[in-house]
Image (cartoon, rainbow, N blue to C red):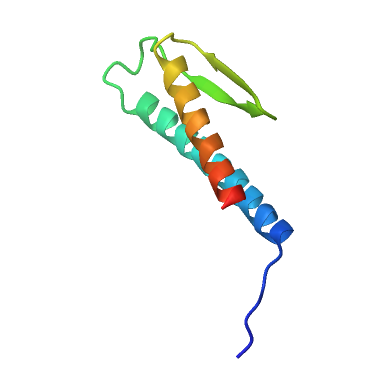
């Protein structure tokens, strides 16, 4: 029986692919839920107001955009959580 020993860079590459795949899945799920909610609303003919927020890190610099002030702290908190999770997984 042979045990495969992965190098540090292999772990980082797999982690990067996992984060990219998670991001695409979240974007797809959010788009699908937004479409579904627009189709099943009670007043489909009237204008509906949707809110969104986007956040993340470029290097160590955080960024965030939101259409509602209540959403920005939530998305920045989630971004910080995933950044800390990434650091923990990277240095464990």
**Figure check: 42 above or below 90:** above
Q: Quadrant of residue 58?
A: top right
Q: At x 69% / y 54%, what residue is drawn?
A: 13
Q: At x 62% / y 44%, what residue is drawn?
A: 20
**Figure check: 11 above or below 51:** below
Q: Quadrant of residue 22?
A: top right
Residue 70 location (% of width, % of height)? 39, 12
**Figure check: 80 above or below 26:** above
Q: Quadrant of the N terminus?
A: bottom right
Residue 30 location (% of width, % of height)? 46, 33
**Figure check: 60 above or below 65:** below
Q: Nearer the viewer, residue 74 or 48?
A: 74
Q: Quadrant of residue 2?
A: bottom right
Q: Is residue 61 left or right of residue 72?
A: right
Q: At x 46% / y 30%, what residue is drawn?
A: 78
Q: Nearer the viewer, residue 34 or 59?
A: 59
Q: Nearer the viewer, residue 30 or 63?
A: 63
Q: At x 63% / y 28%, what residue is drawn?
A: 57
Residue 21 location (% of width, % of height)? 59, 48
Q: Residue furthest bottom?
A: 1
């Amino acid at each position: 029986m042979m045990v495969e020993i992965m190098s540090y860079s292999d772990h980082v590459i797999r982690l990067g692919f996992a984060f990219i795949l998670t991001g695409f899945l979240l974007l797809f799920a959010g788009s699908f839920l937004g479409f579904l909610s627009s189709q099943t609303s009670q007043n489909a003919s009237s204008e509906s107001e949707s809110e969104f927020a986007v956040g993340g890190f470029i290097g160590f610099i955080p960024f965030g955009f939101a259409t509602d002030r209540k959403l920005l702290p939530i998305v920045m908190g989630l971004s910080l959580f995933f950044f800390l999770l990434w650091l923990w997984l990277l240095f464990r």
